[in-house]
Image (cartoon, rainbow, N blue to C red):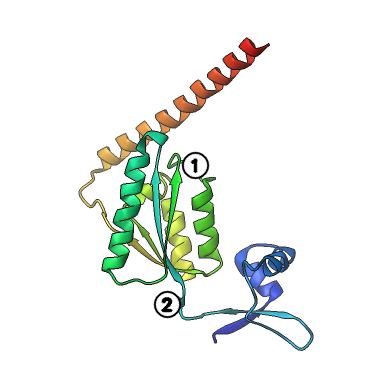
Amino acid sequence: MGILLSIGEMACRLGVAVGTLRRWDREGRLCPKLRTEGGHRRYAIGEDAADGKTVCYARVSCADQKDDLERQKARLGAHAEACGWDNVEVISDLGSGMNCRKRGLQRMLTMIMLGEVSRLVVENKDRLLRFGAELVFLMCRLRGVEVVIIQADAKASFEADLARDVLEVITVFSSRLYGARSHRAKTQIAT
């Protein structure tokens, strides 16, 4: 069965409040393994990771690339099928690699933290996050989640990576700047 933790210990391990765990239990998001005779929740950790699911994560930067997103999802699904993995879920996002507030990314991270994932599959590191992917990989390692990168770009030089990163930063900031200007102009026209 693994190790049983009290609700306080589990809350501390996940970095959430005890009330959050109670709410998750009511919502069916994270249920305790058992309840004591006194009604106290006990959460199991150290379960066999094979029981978790394989999550494939796909992302593109803008709406113009929706066709690319569909192809990316198909490639990830085909890779999972070729490896014979069961219980596969493909999560996708449309947005910048610098935005950590994407709905799919947050859902995937929550699933990892709750111990529902045994394997994370991405095409390459930049599809996950442009900056900070190493933090996600650390979280996966600490939670016992295997990370599979299909197209690890071993040939990319430092200069090429740096140029790509600078272009991404410029693109994000110019999009925000022009978006703010457009919103301001629309507001002035409407008044």
Q: Earlier in the sequence, mark 2 or mark 1?
A: 2
Q: Quadrant of the N terminus?
A: bottom right
Image coordinates for residue 122, horizontal then vertical, percent: 35, 56
Q: Hey, which quadrant is residue 119 in on the image?
A: bottom left
- Residue identified by numbered label 2: 50
Which residue: 33% across, 60% down? 77
Q: Residues within 10 Å of mark 2 (few under 14, many from 20)?
A: some
Question: Would you place residue 138 above or below residue 10 in this image?
Answer: above
Q: Residues within 10 Å of mark 1 (few under 14, many from 20)?
A: few
Image coordinates for residue 55, horizontal then vertical, percent: 42, 62
- Residue identified by numbered label 1: 99
Is 5 positioned to the left or the right of 65 in the image?
A: right
The front one of 58 and 7 is: 58
Q: Is any part of residue 62 visible from this angle?
A: no
Is 141 positioned to the left or the right of 123 in the image?
A: right
Residue extending farthest left: 155
Image coordinates for residue 61, horizontal then vertical, percent: 40, 38
Q: Quadrant of the C terminus?
A: top right
Q: Hey, which quadrant is residue 68 in on the image?
A: top left
Which residue: 26% across, 67% down? 82
Residue extending farthest bottom: 37
Question: Would you place residue 188 above or below residue 63 in this image?
Answer: above
Which residue: 28% across, 58% down? 150
Identify residue type, mark 2: Ala
Question: Would you place residue 72 above or below residue 39 in this image?
Answer: above
Identify residue type, mark 1: Asn
Q: Secondary structure at mark 2?
A: helix
Q: Are marks 2 and 1 in contact (CB under 8 Å)?
A: no
The front one of 3 and 34 is: 34
Image coordinates for residue 5, horizontal then vertical, percent: 64, 79
Q: Is any part of residue 5 visible from this angle?
A: yes
